[in-house]
Image: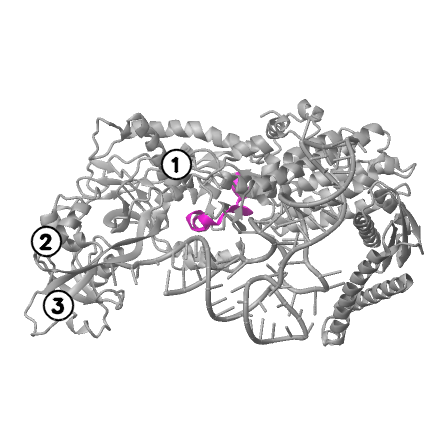
Amino acid sequence: MTAQLKAPEAVLRYSGKSFDPSAVETFLYDWWESSGFFTPGPATPGETPFVMMLPLPNVTGDLHLGHALGFGGYEDLMARWHRMRGEPTLWLPGSDHAGIIAQIVVEKELAKEGAGRTNASDSPTLGLTRDEFLGEMWRWMDHYKPRIYKQLRMLGCSLDWTRVHFTMDPDMQRRVRIHFIRLYRKGHLYRADRIVHWCLTCQTTYSDLEALHIVRTDELSYVRYRWAEAMPAGTPDVVVATTRPETIVADTAVAVHPEDDRWKGFIGREVLVPVSERKVKIVGDAAVDRAFGTGALKVTPGHDATDFEIGQRHGLQVLSAIDPRGFMTPAAGPLAGLDRDAARIAMLEKLKEQGLLVRQEPITHNVGIHDRCGTVDEPLVMKQWWMKMAPLAKPAIEAVRDGTVRIIPKYQEKIYFEWMENIRDWPVSRQIWWGHAIPVWYCTDCDEIVVPAEDAPDPTTCPKCRSTELRHDPDVLDTWFSSALWPHSTLGWPEETSDLARFYPGSVLETGWDILFFWVARMLMMGLENMGDVPFRTVYLHGLVRAGRQKMGKSKGNAVSPVEMIQSHGADALRYALVSGVSAGADSEFSEGKLENGRRFVNKLWNVGRFALTQLEARPAALSGPIDVAPAGAALTEADRWILSRTEAAIEELTRLIEQYQFGEYATALQQFVWTELADFYIELAKPQRRPAGSEDAAVRTLAYVLDRVLRLAHPSIPFVTETLALQLWAHGHRSDPAPSLVTSRWPEAGARDAVLEERFGLAIEVIRRIRERRQEAGVDPRATVQVALGGDAAALEPFAEIIASLTSALVRFGGGEGVPTLVRAVEVRVDVPREAAADRARLEKELAEALTLLDHSETLLRSDFAKRAPAPVVAKARATLAEREAAVASLRAELAKLGT
RNA sequence: GGACCCGUGGCUCAGCGGUUAGAGCACUCGGUUCACAUCCGAGGGGUCGCUGGUUCGAAUCCAGCCGGGUCCACCA
């Protein structure tokens, strides 16, 4: 990477009437990247780096709008802002191999070509070998990874590409392997036969988090279980209700609630499982819902999670009647060999024949499905690797509880605690091919589990029996197993690298709330486990981008490509539109209108810049001091001093908003200042034809300085247009901040404001509005000159007489006048326009009525306990308001009196 | 079964204890093309979901209810 500090010529020369993002975006990004602006410089003593990890996108396709929101909307804004604050900033890029999601995507692609994944019961001739398939996976990765990285660059993300990582890079694989081995040695990983979610389509297990629930209506069958022993006459039959009669053949008990008066006397007695005729016990277990069905539950530990747990509590046998392909096993007796749907029909048939089917009714209930493919969950008991979570969760809960880690918005902390405090063990092995290998071998001869030492080669001999028949675990790890390590593994862990020492723990983790458990919580746990410290101090969770009421996403078919939006409206417009009008954590609806507003705002800023540059070119000698130092001196007009003061106000406010993570408010406030105050007001006053003679140079200096400030203030959100203008502006003179680029320039510090001037100028603006309103009301051509007289407390407005006149084509006089007044607080504004006296009377009466209402509000307020109980400044303010309203009423009454009767 | 979030102008959302509740879009009227394939100016439009309570004062805090959304959970 060669330093290339000279800004691109194309950008320096660019001058469209309206801003064309495509003319500068690529040039600028290439320049930024190749100049090393996104790479933190050498460490310095006492520094406080800003470190953020990119929420690594899955290499499954192109980026969508949700990515654009997080990456381009919030994260780059933060990264650029902190960099401008002088913090060495590392925003580390990368991507995720995405395990099963990616495998499904590639399988679908291959299916189109007629090739498929080899499987025990698939035809091997149609399939690929594992190596061949992994070759296809890598081909996909090699194609899409650069595309995703390109799209991140298009968004303008200031990522340090010299540190890019991919979760399946060889060194990442090594770190994952070491992590597994260490956790295993510490007893956090174990292998056990437990009930798991099994996907018949994907042929793999999955975790609770990956299970979704849908509401479905099924048939609930009531089935009679006969007593296995002689019972007294009149003893009721045991009837259970089930939606899965085919699993009856694997029942190993019937459970009732221990305090259920109907049943508790039968606990310990035996019944016969229909069809298979096995004797099973009636057990008492509090998990049974007395209100459901008959209050008796068939217990099938092999095929139901609740039943499995009941089984554990009562030492019940586990029978597996369904195999991983969805067919009935020999254990299913007469149903063996049928698939599960056929088995259900066959079972119901047999129950009917034997008179054991009491009745059937529809039931609407929740059914678990696999989030990746929608296939109904088939709970099975299998040997899997599990991670023991409770001990890992404990310090991670503590870290949030004691404030070491802060979650924004705050309410998400509750959700975090809720999940973490009830955390369950995590099944980490997956029966797929694409992913991190599990570093475990099994001895064929003695069943020994062989886990190699860290960095040891793959074992070839059983340490226990010396057998060389070792079988490598064919499973891979859940994709989140590797991403949980991301914040430290990418910095070099387990080696004690200088990056790790300098950049861990990080600062902020910004991502969508939907992966709080999947990723954020697990990074916290693994960071604390491996590093003894949290991976970040602040978690900022943004909302989801919705299209209408639905979450936007590719699977929903309503995804809009951010790439297209960048091409049509520019990256700046998109980035700005995504964060504006959104508060922390809230889902937001994205619309064409917002994007269009973004484009217009970017264009407005561009034209503000063009205007300033044009003025600068016309008076090249105007700049006497550095561009980025506030101009001062007697040559400045009231308008100049006003916008300078307002600029300092904007610096104060925008800094505060970003510090407080109020990015939506930041966007709004920025637009308000640039568009309304700077463009609509100040620039109008800065035009040469409106300037008092001799003040032109002051206007140019003010414009240059304010533009410099505004570009810095806007840069974190809209980097391209601001950089283009900054480079062009800075070519006109010298600066105190010599940074070659806005990227490396300093965020402004707020200087002194002139509160009195701002207050009075604000009043002048109100007067201007009133004049315009009166004139429009009277139907006078806005270009025509009107006579305006300012009375009442107008003295403070004298310095702004020319400004008022200039913006309203009015001849302004102070005191007296024939017009009918409009009131701006205690200032009378008389606009002399042709009119009907009757209309004036009506208008005055209406104004008087309004003024009296307000006066009444003030009087009532001050007569109440408010005066005694409210804080003094609040009361003083109310009294001032009362005085103004009294003056207003008096003035209107005097005016009406003048009109006569 | 638990828990969370949201109900503010036609639309998308800010505001979350202090005078007359804001913005963008949309709408109406007027002007301009001299930084802005536009832009500027002015205007109309809201009993802040409902009902109580706390407070000198509530869109803002509390409780209940209604409506919308979401998460967690072993209802067969």
Compared across the picture, whether A840 is left or right of A257 comes to right
Q: Is residue A889 above or below residue A789?
A: below
| Label 2 sits on residue | A350
Closer-to-camera residue (A108/A165)? A108
Q: Position of residue A405 (x, y in %)?
A: 52, 54
Above or below, A328 against A744 in this view is: below
Q: Which mark is residue A237?
A: 3
Residue A170, x across and y down, in percent:
40, 32
Q: Specify start and end residues of the magenta stretch as a single range.
A: A498-524
Three-letter amino acid code at the position of disc 3 = Asp
> Is-magenta flag for residue A385?
no
Residue wearing tag 1 = A173
- Number of other residues with Cα within 10 Å of mark 1, as a class: few under 14, some 14 to 19, many 20 or more: some
Amino acid type of disc 1?
Gln
Nearer to the camera, A193 or B44: B44
What separation in Å lies between label 1 and label 3 (alpha carbons)?
A: 59 Å
- Lower sequence index among marks 1 and 2: 1
- Residue A463: image quadrant is top left
Distance between mark 2 and mark 3 Cα atoms: 18 Å
